[in-house]
Amino acid sequence: MNCISLGTFDMLHRGHIMLFKKCRELAGKEKVIVGLNTDEFVTRYKGRPPIMSFDERRAVIKELGIVDEVLTNGQIDGDAKEIIENSGAKLIVIGSDWARKDYVKQLGLDWDWLDRQEIGVAYVTYTRGVSTTELKRRLQ
């Protein structure tokens, strides 16, 4: 089944790559899709722009050879339904660090909508000790 992971993926690191590899494993012969947040979305959501531009982040993700397609996630109203529907994904894959942050609600979704669309959510074990936040901290 097609799998999608949505995010910023700024300063690509081992945790991101492990997430994409797990998506590949779950998708099997189907597509691995990344819904990549636009610079504008990141700035609005986090209050600051990403370090790497959208085009830089997209290019690096494509070069990995793990992801089949990168879609633009510019959800203005916080609703990710359109990008998920357009992806054809039946599984949303996210790191387990989001499990207690109500990731589904953050995407502007609810469990009833996911059930009606027959879309599941898989939480992949978070790679401890590495994150974009940690990398930024080290640079300071």
Image (cartoon, helix red, strand yellow):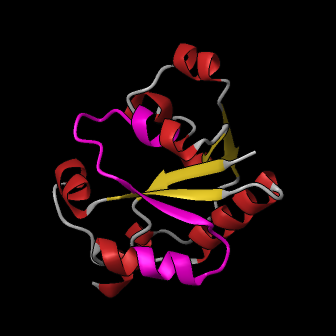
Quarter of the image where one finds residue 18: bottom right
Inspect the magenta stretch and tell me whether residue 88 lies in it: no
Q: Tell me residue 38's x, y (percent).
A: 29, 60
Question: Which image quarter: residue 139?
Answer: bottom left
Quarter in which the C terminus is drawn: bottom left
In percent of width and height, residue 106 lies at 39, 34
Residue 11 in view of the camera: no
Count the labels in the image: 0
Q: Residue 105: x percent and y percent?
A: 42, 27
Quarter of the image that includes the N terminus: top right
Q: Position of residue 94 (x, y in %)?
A: 59, 48
| Residue 43 at least partly seen | yes
- Compared to residue 102, the image places residue 137 above or below, namely below
Q: In percent of the image, x 24 and y 52: which residue is there?
A: 41
Q: Please report the residue visible at 38 percent of the width from the left and 67 percent of the height from the top.
A: 133
Query: Which one is in front, 90 or 111?
Result: 90
Q: Tell me if 134 is positioned left or right of 127 in this view.
A: left
Question: Viewer-proximal residue, 15 or 58?
Answer: 58
The answer to whether residue 112 is left or right of residue 46 is right
Residue segment shown in magenta: 58-84
The residue lying at 49 percent from left, 68 percent from top is 131
Residue at the image point whose x is 48% and y is 82% from the top: 60
